[in-house]
Image (cartoon, rainbow, N blue to C red):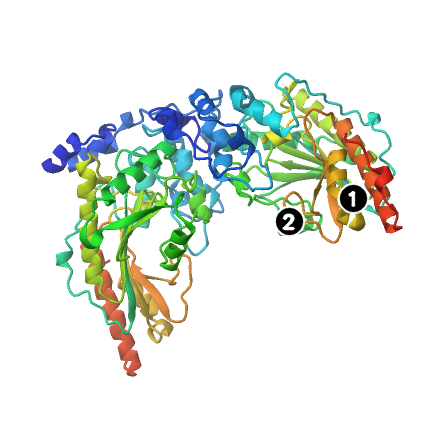
Amino acid sequence: MANNFARILSGKRNVGIMSLVGAGSLTAAFLLNREHVTAGAQVRRVYPASADYPDLRKHNNCMASHLTPAIYAKLVDKATPNGYTLDQAIQTGVDNPGHPFIKTVGMVAGDEESYEVFADLLDPVIKERHNGYDPQTMTHPTDLDSSKLKSGKFDERYVLSSRVRTGRSIRGLSLPPACTRAERREVEKVVVDALAGLKGDLAGTYYSLTHMTDQEQQQLIDDHFLFDKPVSPLLTCSGMARDWPDARGIWHNNTKTFLIWINEEDHTRVISMEKGGNMKRVFDRFCTGLKEVERLIQEKGWEFMWNERLGYILTCPSNLGTGLRAGVHVNLPKLSKDPRFTKILDNLRLQKRGTGGVDTAAVGSTFDISNLDRLGQSEVQLVQTVVDGVNYLIECEKKLEKGQDIKIPPPVRK
Amino acid sequence: MPFGNTHNALKMKYASSEEYPDLSQHNNHMAKILTPAIYERLRSKQTPSGFTLDDVIQTGIDNPGHPFIMTVGCVAGDEETYEVFKELLDPIIEDRHGGYKPTDKHKTDLNPNNLKGGDDLDPNYVLSSRVRTGRSIRGFCLPPHCSRGERRGVEKMSVEALDSLSGDLKGKYYALKNMTDAEQQQLIDDHFLFDKPVSPLLLASGMARDWPDGRGIWHNDTKTFLVWVNEEDHLRVISMQKGGNMKEVFNRFCTGLTKIETLFKDKGTSFMWNEHLGYVLTCPSNLGTGLRAGVHVKIPNMSKHAKFEEVLKRLRLQKRGTGGVDTAAVGGTFDISNADRLGFSEVELVQMVVDGVKLLVDMEKKLEKGQSIDNIMPAQK
């Protein structure tokens, strides 16, 4: 802890007391009563809070579930030191009532301090979204020691590819919903400079969205690496697509197994992936790469946004903690038709998606299976959960192939 | 909103050159006019309600534009935007509105008796006639910037005014968030219902926030006078009917608008208006009269004629598809309307449409008979 603190203090970017303090339960309590964090610009308001309170009667998202008129009235006049307001944080949830079956988060952070200034709303949202994790009393474990992972090589007759992703934010710069163009460009510069220092199998090239050639673009599309301007109103309503494609880009290593998105939904999204079932190697590269990037930005006086109660800080509260999604594309023709499939996944703390990502349906019987949780469990724990869980699913599939029966496993945690 | 004055202080930490947008791929009025020097001078400013330069230009940054269509690329968040950011907006207005100078005065004329003719456009060709404009209520921020409370305030005040209209203007308000399925279907069938905008030009300005809160449609019982509340502007006012009697449409338009304005004055407010810019609306393209008078007209022969575009240009008219601004024409039926908004009065613009459409129909009839139209080509207005 003392090391962290000293390192933070020596960092070049001193952006206010808030972001310097990331350690210790005493300081956590201090953080929760930080009236003086609202040293930002005065919020201009002409109407009382009750006249501006949003109509959330048709809404079904975490923000709408927890934003009472009282909380709104308490927070609506506040702003973070950068000037980010409650109305800005909740706009995406007001504009997107949600789906009756999928509960979206409905709010974003504009900067690191949002999680403190708007804690009265964000803490209950976080608790609901993260399976009861209470930011006011709990601490989040970070563990990027991939050597602890047990097993992690899947049967490649079933597992087609393996992937681990997370996000990282650069402390001292506003997040995508709120950042100015200069800040966004600074994020790009800081990260690209650091990535240029990667060596060996991590050495790679940066492709800026603004400057890439048609040929480069086609190659990135063929590799399934290219990200495009978001179309989902969940994202665009938060303001994160402003000024597209300025300061956005993709970096990947020469072997195309380590990939970083810059200034999409987060400052950075970090992805390690390869065909086949060697999740262990994917996770090794993930941890090595992340730590190397962190070391390189620290050389220049920067660091990632992180604190003990929330782990790594990202734009969407759903990605706090580890921000980690470890997953596979796996073929489960028999198991996926079994009526117990969903329950098995639930108990294993796994989630299924189509192979096109979060909003897609499965094609044939190939599923994207990944961890449900993000916060409250470490990286090692979550990847282990995926390894153990996917192995179990494959065992079920093999049993069903042989005409044997399968069992719903006991829940791996509460 | 979207990112208001609360971020302006943050931006000032950075040099102007670091914040200046990349407009190298852009083709809109804002991108043509904005320079690093102008950006530097204006970026620390904000209107009294907190609307900033970046708020003004965000839609133009996010929408580089089309190589053939020149969009405006900026919006106003309140009446004062046009003053505080004059240095940027005056040249844009001049460029967009045919050389209208910062010192020019705009004439307002809503006296329908000044319109000559207009009641005899041939209904075999002219299928429908319509006049629309917008109005903003002084004292409230405009759709890109207003808070929910303000937007609801605009709605409340507008509905109160509209509810007191009588005679053939008597009607009813349908709030978007409260309408029944039956009401919604009727409004769709009448072609009255407006939906949440999908155009990124509009969305990027922040005007669709909180949809459908505070939005609604009012129309009179005879369905010839229609008001949209809180779509792209505080109010959009539309008078329309089938056939070619533009005079009647314009009469009703002027009568209705004048009555509504009187009702607002009784409540101690008024429409945003000044001598230089006329009626103040969200998009600089709608300043002045904010008026688009148009017809749906069947001109299959004329529209294929080599001189069609030239004729329209000389008549100061514009063509659109019958689905509105972003659509293509279907089967030779076009939406023909005035190209100008500012620098001409309402009467003058409607006169141009009436006279111009009459000529186009005459040309169509000639072409049907295989005659030439060369001897009735108009002079440039």
* Residue lying furthest top: B103
Instruction: State the image coordinates of residue B279 (x, y, percent, origin top left).
Output: 65, 25
**Callouts 2 and 1 on one subunit:** yes
Indicate which disc residue A158 carries: none
- Where residue B82 sits: x, y (%)? 56, 22
Query: In the image, is residue A308 above or below residue A16?
Result: below
Q: Secondary structure at mark 2?
A: helix
Residue B8 point in image, percent of width and height: 40, 26
* Viewer can see residue A379: no
Front residue (pair B146, A290)? A290
User: In the rendered structure, the residue with mark 1 lies on which chain?
Assistant: B
Task: Say left or right for B349 vs A289.
Answer: right
- In 3D space, how far apart are the residues under numbered discs 2 and 1 (Cα atoms)? 23 Å
Asked if the residue under mark 1 is in contact with the one under mark 2, i.e. CB atoms within 8 Å, the reply is no
The numbered mark, 2 or 1, whose residue comes first in the sequence reads 1
Question: What residue is disc 2 on?
Answer: B184
The residue at the far bottom in this view is: A403
Of marks 2 and 1, the one in the foreground? 1
Q: Furthest-left residue in view?
A: A2
Q: Quadrant of residue A173?
A: top left
Indicate which disc residue B128 carries: 1
Q: In this image, A194 relative to B176: left or right?
A: left
Residue at disc 1, secondary structure: strand
Along the line of sight, which residue is nearer the eye, A326 or A292?
A292
Give the residue at x 52% y 40%: B203
User: What's the amino acid at mark 2?
Assistant: Gln
